[in-house]
Amino acid sequence: MASVTPEKLAKERHEWEENKMKIKNQHVTDDGTQSFFWRAHTITILLIAMAVLVYVALIEEQVQDHSYNVKRGLVACAAFFVLFGVTQTPDGPFIRPHPALWKFVLILSVLYEISLIFMLFQTVDDARQLLTHVDRNLGKPLPEKDYGGNCLIYDPGNPSDPFHNFWDKMDGFVTTHFFGWWLKTLIIRDYWLCNVMSIGFELLEYSLQHQLPNFSECWWDHWVLDVIVCNGLGIYLGMKTCEYFTMKPYYWRGLWNIPTFKGKLKRIVGQFSPYNWIAYDWRPTSSLKRWIYMLLVMTFFFTAELGTFYLKYILWVPPPHFLCLGRLVFMWLVGAVAMRETFEFMDNPYCKRMGAQTWMCIAIITTEVLIVFKFDWETVTKPFPTTVAWCWIIFFGSLALWTVYQFIFKPLYYSFRHSEENKKNH
């Protein structure tokens, strides 16, 4: 078996990229109509922003409230920064429903990272009090809910409601799990990777339940309700959605070029669907470099998932709070762009720099981890139970040995055999 050189692998990737572009061109047709909706309107937005500042400076009556003025000033600074980003930053890989939306997400990620850095320089008590400026009901310790306990699905000791353990687990997070994995699948676009992450996170919950009590769940809650029902169904429907987007022909016409009202309405709805669709072929074992990239992608993915639980636990934010849900939606939008940029960075040999949203995503996840370690070192450094520690030692040892065998020993062996065969033939 001949060895696969980096030059040959790059050529194969390039040819695959050319085929992908041919397929995309066959399925995407755009008449190029540039309507009022698509223009940047940079001058108009600048004039409006300056008019607001003129009103505040010369017309509005001054308010003698220090706290109110500080908050409003910070909001105004953030708003101007967002306006600058939306109008002046270059377009990203996504342009539907409008490029300005994805620019807005990028600029919000910068603001979020700045907020995290500011929080990192505070004490944990000051950080909790900072959140009370968002919601006065925050800043109070949370009652932790343990999902473990009695794991009997049918409890004969409670004849009035023998299935009370099951119904107690059927809270709003069941729906969140299902729709969450549907959306995650749309940004990952791979059965193998989605299922590895789904099962892997349940194993992380088993491993970390000594640190966070709400990771303690019944076995059927982990493997039946979460992995098979919620995550599995979400992944399945997500991949079916990906297949639909892959096969769908994309024919874009300007709204005013469509003669019928029904056609115009369909075009407006279609604006909120992808402009085109690229199926991700991750090929994690095609090279050592790509395998390491995939391990890093999964590591950051798991870290971002765990950050949701650790941050709410440390900063005393209840799970149903809009900050928790808002962070999940925001990180999904950030992750969608970051995953697209990451795939291109891995797959396209001519892409030599990391995407802006990927850069910000890594910075956000890293800063969140630092906040968790700084604010609650005692919790995150609780020693693993002996069984859990040995399981992870065996896992990482096996992973390292397999990596060495697959990408170092095996290519050397086949290269040696190939050279010996050449000698015999000559």
Image (cartoon, rainbow, N blue to C red):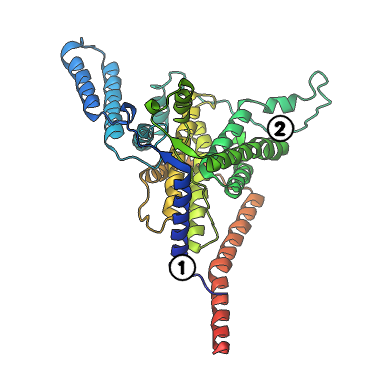
- Is 159 rendered above or below residue 106? above
Which of pointers 2 and 1 lies earlier in the amino acid sequence?
1
Q: Nearer the viewer, mark 2 or mark 1?
A: 1
**Where is residue 299 shown, x and y percent of the image?**
51, 49
Q: Is mark 2 on a helix, strand or loop?
A: loop
Q: Badge 1 local density, few (<14 within 10 Å), some, or many (20+)?
A: few
Residue appearing at x 47%, y 30% in the figure: 270
Q: Position of residue 292 (x, y in %)?
A: 49, 58
Residue 338, picture quadrant = top left
Residue of label 2 = 149
**Residue, disc 1:** 8
C-alpha distance separating marks 2 and 1: 56 Å
Considering depth in this image, is 106 or 318 the residue closer to the camera? 106
Q: Where residue 394 is drawn, which disc sits there?
A: none
Can you tell which quarter of the image residue 55 is in? top left
The picture places residue 154, in percent across and down from the top left corner, at: 80, 29
Q: In this view, does 277 lie to the left or right of 53?
A: right
Residue 300 vertical position relative to residue 18 in the rendered view, above or below: above
**Taking the image as drawn, is residue 185 in sight?**
no
Quarter that holds the N terminus: bottom right
- Residue closest to the eye, 37 or 175: 37
Q: In this view, does 56 lie above or below 99?
A: above
Give the amino acid at mark 1: Lys
Residue at point 46% right, 20% down? 261
Q: Which residue is drawn at 30% across and 24% down?
A: 75
